[in-house]
Amino acid sequence: MYKCKCCNHETLPVPPEDALGFICPICFWENDVFTTDDDEPSDENHGISLKRARKNYISHGICDPRLQCKDSTHLSTFAPVDKTLGDHMPFLVSLEENGDNELHIVLTASVLGENVPDMTDEFPAPVAEVVSQCRPILPGSRTIDIRFDNYILYQVRNESYASPDRTEVKHGKYLCVYAESKLLAYLETVTDVQRSEDGSTYPGPWRHYGIRTQNQIIDVVSHFEPMVTIKENESGESK
Ligand SMILES: [Zn+2]
């Protein structure tokens, strides 16, 4: 992998000079193969220079804060990974804080196990019949690693006791980004974040990310776009 010229994360599959039209999933900078210096306005990036984009990434977590409005919830590192999960709700492996308010969440995708063995001796025939058609859901061999460099707030709810939020407007199924939610409405009462009348927010454009796993519902509000990487377990074994 090669480093994005804006955010410096290794997101480019080919060297920058060959990555024509590649949009970085972390900072959303479109790799520009035509500009020759960092001060030059980039036509691929609505006329902002690479130098400006780097400053924006440091202060806003995105190359151009104009990209981050209510309607741009699809512009997230969550969206492409969520699509790869299909109907398989992931399992939570770990959730931990690393030092200075960095949040690290590890998930494993789920897979369907083998059909359960014949149960005709243990259950009445109709029940055994139903059971025989069941397949267990097991943790899979793919690991999804999610890192927030910083966050404003996070919470973990036991999935069994979580009440539905009928006000939510979200994009995504298991890795979601919310445009509206009760948590976003509640945020300003328990933290110092602020939304000005012109729509701008302090300490940067914050977003509500939701992670639904088999047993937990995790909500993270952060002004940094998380870095998401998928790792295939080479042996292919479930664990
Ligand atoms: Zn980038």
Image (tube, rainbow, N blue to C red):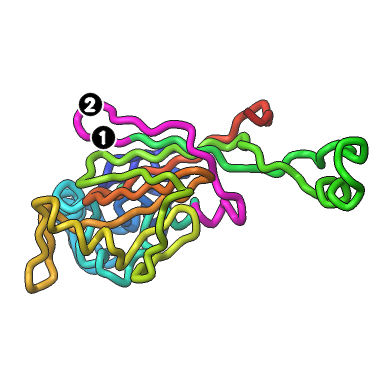
**Which residue is at 25% across, 68% downward?**
69
**Which residue is at 26% across, 34% downward?**
102
| Type of amino acid under label 2 | Gly
Viewport quadrant of the C terminus: top right
Task: Report the magenta residues as a range.
Answer: 82-103
Q: Is residue 69 left or right of residue 122?
A: left
| Type of amino acid under label 1 | Glu
**Which residue is at 48% across, 38% downward?**
92
Q: Is residue 113 magenta?
A: no
Q: Is residue 182 left or right of residue 76?
A: left
Q: Position of residue 45 (x, y in %)?
A: 27, 64
- Can you tell which quarter of the image residue 22 is in? bottom left
In the image, 20 versus 106, the foreground residue is 106
Q: Position of residue 75 (x, y in %)?
A: 36, 61
- Can you tell which quarter of the image residue 123 is in? top right
**Which residue is at 38% across, 33% downward?**
95
Give residue 138's mark.
none
Q: Position of residue 14 (x, y in %)?
A: 46, 44
Q: Is residue 212 above or below residue 96?
A: below
Viewport quadrant of the N terminus: top left
In the image, 33 versus 210, the foreground residue is 210
Q: Is residue 84 magenta?
A: yes
| Label 1 SS | strand
Q: Is residue 217 visible?
A: yes
Give residue 99's mark.
2
Circles 1 and 2: CB distance less than 8 Å? yes
In the image, 62 versus 48, the foreground residue is 62
| Label 2 SS | loop
Q: Is residue 186 left or right of residue 18?
A: left
Give residue 102's mark.
1
Q: Is residue 71 left or right of residue 128?
A: left
